[in-house]
Every structure is written in structure tokens, then in C-alpha cells.
Image (cartoon, rainbow, N blue to C red):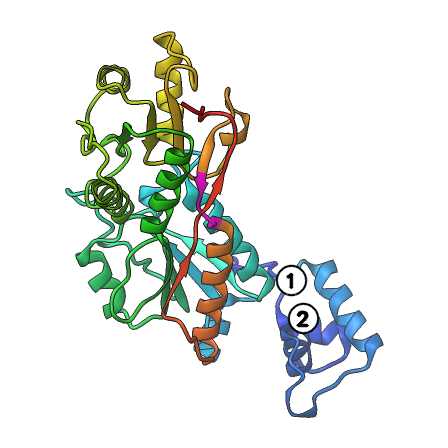
Amino acid sequence: MARKATTSRPTLAMIAKECGVSNATVSRVLRGDHAHGFSVRPEVRDRIMQTVAKLNYRPDLTARSLRAQQTHVIAVLGLNHQWKSSSDVNNAAIGAAVDVLHELGYSVCTSFPKPTADGSSEGQLPPWRVDGYLLVGIQTHKSLVEVEASGIPYVGINTRVGTKGYACQVDDALGIKKVLDYLQEMGHQRIAYRNGSADRARPDSHAVQDRHVAFVNEITSRQLPLLDHHESMVMDDKEFLNQALAAKATAILSYDLTESIRLMQAAYQMSVNIPGDISLIGFNDEYPAALLTPPLTVMGVPARSMGRQAAVMLVDLLQGRKVDERIRVFEEQLITRQSVARV
């Protein structure tokens, strides 16, 4: 005779029975619900929490979300374009955002959809219910249309958003201006630009586009020479360094920290001294910029501040509070170390 399937998973009713209280009392204690004058004696609350721990009770989030029409879960979208480098600025932003969301009572998840033929994030929405989205990485027009059509509130971190979206972004044009101000103050006039490499950055990335355009515009407005290969995303690191030296560049500005590290490796292999033979400055003050030899001068992106603010903005949207700035712009900060020499 077949035996009936049983489960040893503890239930809210089991907690209530053992504590001698109603199911509703246990539920409200676990939610921290103090509305409508609800209160419970401290010893009863302690007994409930001790029983929860003893039985290793875990709430049924699916049932709870169906009842409350909320999941208290936030999904991070766009990570199929991240986590390729420990020095990626978005990693720091996501970490800070997750910390804030946890403090505010939200869980965080993500999904890793199979990239489309063009490498975009189309089809990135998870098949489960969530309350909101945090967007990172490269968001194409198609992927943004998909997010906006979902009707779920979202905030982008260092990425473009659609007309319904909110975002925390950086002012790369101002960052480029600060870099060139500093390099000219150090005597540099011939400045090469190392664009993001195609094996890890996409040409339609807003950061790749914005920084490159800002560099070209700022160099042109200062009537400085625009050296060749500033737009290239495919040139080998050693070849780029050779070309920069042949063009008598005295400094290189690199798109991000990974590009800076690759150039430093190429320089080491070619016996090119930084900053003796050529100076180097790059974007993003993430690990291990300060530990390189020489320690790298950078234009630091305030990734953690952006992540924290994005999380707060999203929770404000979810809880019906007014968000004054739809697009919050953050200023980048120059951090001088030892990779730039005076000429």
C-alpha cells in the first residue's frame, strides 16, 4: 500500500500551536507589523522567535507575495555583460545597492539570459515576480522597451534608461575635462586615447561612446593634436603603445581600469617605463588601481554612492514616495598617484 507523502517543513500553524497563539499573531510578529494598535507581550514575541529558530521556519515567499501583491524582491538586470573583470566599476555599485536593499528589507536576485546575436540584454526579464529592477551594463533600445513594457519600476546604474526609468549616471564630459586640465597642468600636450577593447566592451556602450566623444570634443576645443587610433577598439595593446610613442605622445588616457592594466602589462613587456617614457591615466578607481606599479592616477567614478542612491530611489518609487530627480548625475573625482609625470 502506497504511503502518503509527508513533509517535515515547518509551517506557521505549527509555530502558532506550539506557542499557544493564533496564526495571525505569529504572522504579524514575523512581519514586524505594528499597524492598527497591534501589540504583543515581549515574552510572547520572544517565545515565537525562539520557536521559529528551533524549527528553522522559513516563510513561503510565493504565498506571501500572492496575498500581499508584493514580493519584496528586486532583480538586477544586465549582468550578462558584467562580472568579466574584478575591476568593473559596476560590481562596486551593485554591491553597495544590495547592501542598502537588504537593510530596507528587500531580497535581491538576478538572471543570466542567453545573449542575443548582437550581445544585447533582450529577453533579460526573469520569469518570476519581482517588485522592481536595477539595470546595469549595456541596455539597448530593444531591452529598454522590454523593461518599460513590464510596467515594473526600475532604476539604472551607470546606464541609459527609457522615458519611464530613473537613473544614477556620471558626468563623463566633466570627467574628461578634469583629466585634460590635470594633464595640461603637468605639461602634457600630446595625449593619446585608448578606447575600450572590442573583446570586452561594445561599441554601442554609452560609456564607450560618451567618453570617446567627450575626449574628441575637449581635445578639439583646446586646439590640441588629436592623435591617431583614438577610436580603435581592436588594436593590440603593444601596437597601440608603439603607435603612441611614435606619435610622440607624452600621456595616454585609457577608457577604464582594465585597459590601463593591459597597457601597463604591454609596457612592462616592451621595457617601456611608466611614467618615465610615457604617462598613464585611466577611469575607475577600483581594485587594484592603487596597488599597481606605479600606483595608477585615475578619474574615480563614485560607484558605491551611485549604487546606494539607486537603491534608495527604487525603494522610494515602490513605496509611493516622490523622487525629485529622475536622472541623478554624479561628479567624478581625480585621484592623483604616481603614473603621471611632469614634462
Q: Quadrant of the C terminus?
A: top left
User: Would you say residue 301 sits in the magenta stretch?
Assistant: yes
| Residue shown at 39% from the left, 17% from the top | 265
> What span is in magenta?
299-303
- What amino acid type is highlighted by mark number 1? Tyr
Counting from the top left corner in percent of width and height, residue 140 is at 21, 53
Answer few, some or many: residues within 10 Å of disc 2's Cα (few below 14, many 20 plus, some between 14 and 19): some
Q: Secondary structure at mark 1?
A: loop
Classify mark 2: helix, strand or loop: helix
Residue 32 is drawn in which quadrant? Answer: bottom right
Question: What residue would you read off at disc 2?
Answer: 14
- Check if mark 1's residue and mark 2's residue have beta carbons within 8 Å: yes
Residue 2 appearing in the image: no
Q: Position of residue 293 (x, y in %)?
A: 51, 19
Q: CA distance from mark 1 to mark 2?
A: 10 Å
The residue drawn where x is 35% and y is 21% is 263
- Mark 1: give few (<14), some (14-19) or many (20+) Cα within 10 Å: some
Write down the quadrant of residue 189 in the picture. Answer: top left
* Residue 28: % across, % down: 65, 79
For the residue pair 137 and 205, the one nearer the viewer reads as 205
Residue sticking out furthest to the left: 117
Question: In the figure, 233 relative to 148: above or below?
Answer: above
Q: Mark number for residue 333?
A: none
Q: Amino acid at mark 2?
A: Met
Q: Which residue is mark 1?
A: 57
**Farthest residue in the right direction?**
43
